[in-house]
Amino acid sequence: EQIEKNNFDHFMLKEIYEQPSAITDTYRGRLQVDAGLIRMAGVDDNLERFLNAKRIVIVACGTSWHAGLVAEYIFEDLARIPVEVEYASEFRYRNPIINSDDVVIAISQSGETADTMAAIKLAKEKGAFVFGVCNVVGSSISRETHAGAYTHAGPEIGVASTKAFTTQITVLTLIALKLAKAKGTISNSDFHMHLRELETIPGKVELALESNDHIKKVADKYKDARNCLYLGRGFNFPVALEGALKLKEISYIHAEGYPAAEMKHGPIALIDEEMPVVVIATRKGHYEKVVSNIQEIKSRQGKIIGIVTEGDTSVRDLADYVIEVPDTIEALTPLLTTIPLQLLSYHIAVMLGKNVDQPRNLAKSVTVE
Ligand code: G6P
């Protein structure tokens, strides 16, 4: 097993560190920067279905559902297609309205999640075109869907999903960009800029991983917290949800993710000197507004851990700790801001002596209801 872990202490840490190569594998052969092209057979062969879709419905569970939420921001922003993101378990039982011109995208690392499978079958019965985004090749969901795109992240063993999440976002970004180009909702120069930027992401993830020792110190400081709040806005709101989920899953510390501006409608009541608040405050996307949210936390003595763009000074002045990530375009920031949150929960769980790769009560894939 030690060989399989490639000398990392846990599969989860190995998989966190595999993300630069996993993301590269996801876009290899698909992203053709020089030709200014994105090739994805599953989308190319069904382009009309995608272009005629009045909306896209995304169904998924757990971390894959969070990837769906990121995709909602990306699809609507770039390709101007309305997107709804549904928990598969809710969708399947609530008599959803599905039209034959809907495209349903099912996201699943394992490709075996029972609720997601049931949602797919229902969507197919109603005549929708169902597209799968799976990691496990040949899995049940990849066979049940009309077409799909694999994430090519390689096997993910740790129960807490890491590289599957970032590679799902990568695949969904490629699809969104492809559709944006075909629909003409993105200019040529913007399209090329996005392709070039996407190609730099693995190197930037590598840089984000270099904060590991610093993140360990932050983890040591907050490992005894009873609760933790994660805030983000825009593309990074789902990243806040995912950061909180990671902490819950492996450290058993109660954590909540919230859209930063919604804090004043509830969670702000919880803030005192005992409450660590992780705030994603990258320079792109509502930065000033997030800084003012940070001020509100500070004035209530909350402890602030800021996830910031390198070189940031405003948040540094207010926060107890900052963790830097490289700069990128707004739509791609989730691929970078996710990394420190994965490492933070990993180190806290290790310091608390928890079983990181096999947390209590959780399964890698939930194949029964
Ligand atoms: C389980 C796993 C999660 C995963 C979720 C959905 O709860 O522990 O890590 O996100 O199932 O799994 P899927 O394979 O469909 O992405």
Image (tube, grey):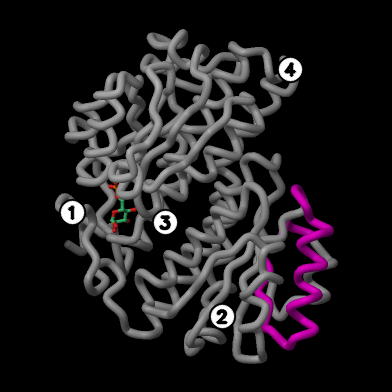
Q: Residue 137 is drawn in which quadrant?
A: top left
Label 2 near ligand 1 (CB < 8 Å): no
Q: Nearer the viewer, residue 108 or 19?
A: 108
Q: Nearer the viewer, mark 1 or mark 2?
A: 1
The CA span between labels 4 and 3 is: 34 Å
Q: Amino acid at mark 4?
A: Ser
Q: Which residue is mark 4?
A: 187
Q: Residues within 10 Å of mark 1 (few under 14, many from 20)?
A: few
Pointer 4 or 2: first along the chain: 4
The image shows residue 264, relative to residue 160, as above or below, that is below
- Mark 2 sits on what residue? 217
Kind of residue sitting beneath label 1: Glu
Q: Is residue 245 magenta?
A: no
Q: Secondary structure at mark 2?
A: helix
* Nearer mark to the viewer, of 4 and 3: 4
> Alpha-carbon distance for marks 3 and 1?
29 Å
Which residue is found at the position 40% from the left and 22% from the top?
A: 99
The residue tagged 1 is 369
Q: Quadrant of the N terminus?
A: bottom left
Residue 231 in the image: above or below residue 89: below
Res. 321 visible in picture: yes
Q: Amino acid at mark 2?
A: Lys
Front residue of this view, candidates 119 and 335? 119
To which residue does mark 3 refer? 16
Secondary element at tag 4: loop
Upstream in the sequence, badge 3 or badge 2?
A: 3
Q: Is 204 on the left-hand or right-hand side of 364?
A: right
